[in-house]
Each structure stands twice: as C-alpha cells, then as structure tokens.
Amino acid sequence: MEWIIPGTVLTAKKDDAVYIENQFNSMFLGGGMVLSQVAGITGLEPYTVQNWVKRGFLPPPERKKYTLGQLCRIININMLKNVLPMERICGMLSYINGHLDDESDDIIDDSKLYFMFVRLAAHYRVMHNTEGRDAYIDKELESYAEPVPGAKERVKKVLCIMLTAWASAQLQSAAEKMLNEIEGERK
C-alpha cells in the first residue's frame, strides 16, 4: 500500500517503512542538503524553512547545507503544524531536546526520533488502542540507550503525542474528503 511519508511529499510503500531511514541516509552521502532540496522533500516554501531557523526552531545550516537531523526536525514540525500550534510543537521538542537551536543538549537525534515515528506510523492502523500503541512504542525503544535517566520515558511521551496528532490529521483529512463528496452530490 502506497502512502505519503509523514511530513514529506514523498511516497513509498507502507511495508517499506523500515527502509526509509536508509533511503534518507543515502541522500546525505555527498554532504548536506541545500534549501531547495529541503523544500522539495517537505513541500514547504523556502522562506518558511528560513523563518523557522530565524525563530530558533532549529540550528542554522552550516555553509548553506542542512544535516539529516535538521531535515528531520523540519519534517517533524511540518507534520504536526496543521494539528498543533507551533508553540506547543516547539515545547514538545524542547521537552526532549532542550534548546532547539542547540543540538548539544539533545537526548535523541531528530532523525532517530523521526524514523522511529515513521516505523510506528506505518503500523498505526493495527495498534487498536493505547495499550497496543504503547507496546509498539516500547518495542521501538528497546534499543534506545538513555543518555540521561528518564530520557526513554520522555521520548515515549513525545512519540505518543506525535502519533496521536498525526492520526488526528489523517482523520481530519478523511472527514474533509467525505464532506467534499457529499457536497459534490448536492450539486
């Protein structure tokens, strides 16, 4: 089943979610990405990304090149921005990564967080309830090494929020599609 990789305009097979991290890593073999490439992957206008850098949502690119971690931070924000207010998204990301414009205080790299999320989102329909979701998240976090005590629990909470917000956006989109269909029937 094809799906749009969350927070991007890229499509992939949902069953291939475990390989998306490798695909993204291969995009960075030659170094970082320029702004136009980031915009192409996310569907965001370049000025939006620049604005987020200016507002301190992520560190500025070095020599005009974005790292994989920066791209994933942008994707995480992009994925949640239609459901949660920007201040709440930044607060959530600060909960696990301190100052958003300083990567030295992060308890998880943004790319690791994002790829965990992608693998979880690919299975969201079979999680059934909060217990199922928590079991999937616990399994995903098995290999996560806590840099500080309590880090794993913080990351788990953020993944729960991200999954819930993303699922909410999926439901909202489905409801809008259904509304458009019935409005089309009345014409």
Image: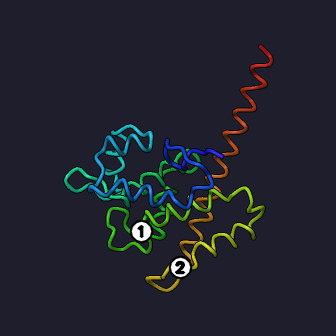
Q: Which residue is pictured at 48% across the width and 48% down the height?
A: 78
Residue 146: give x, y in percent of width and height.
48, 82
Residue under circle 2? 143
Residue under circle 1? 109
Q: How crowded is mark 2: few (under 14 residues within 10 Å), some or many (20 or more)?
A: few
Q: Quadrant of the C terminus?
A: top right
Residue 85: give x, y in percent of width and height.
53, 50
Q: In this view, does 24 lie above or below 130?
A: above
Kind of residue indicated by mark 2: Ser
Residue 128: give x, y in percent of width and height.
78, 61
Q: Nearer the viewer, residue 145 or 58?
A: 145
| SS at circle 2 | loop
Q: In this view, does 9 lie above or below 146?
A: above
Task: Return the residue found at the far bottom.
Answer: 149
Q: Which residue is pictured at 62% across the width and 62% down the height?
A: 120
Q: How crowded is mark 1: few (under 14 residues within 10 Å), some or many (20 or more)?
A: some
The reply, left or right, for residue 147 in relation to residue 134 is left
Kind of residue indicated by mark 1: Asp
Q: Is residue 7 above or below residue 31?
A: above
Q: Which residue is pictured at 42% across the width and 55% down the height?
A: 24
Q: Quadrant of residue 110?
A: bottom left
The reply, left or right, for residue 53 in relation to residue 14 is left
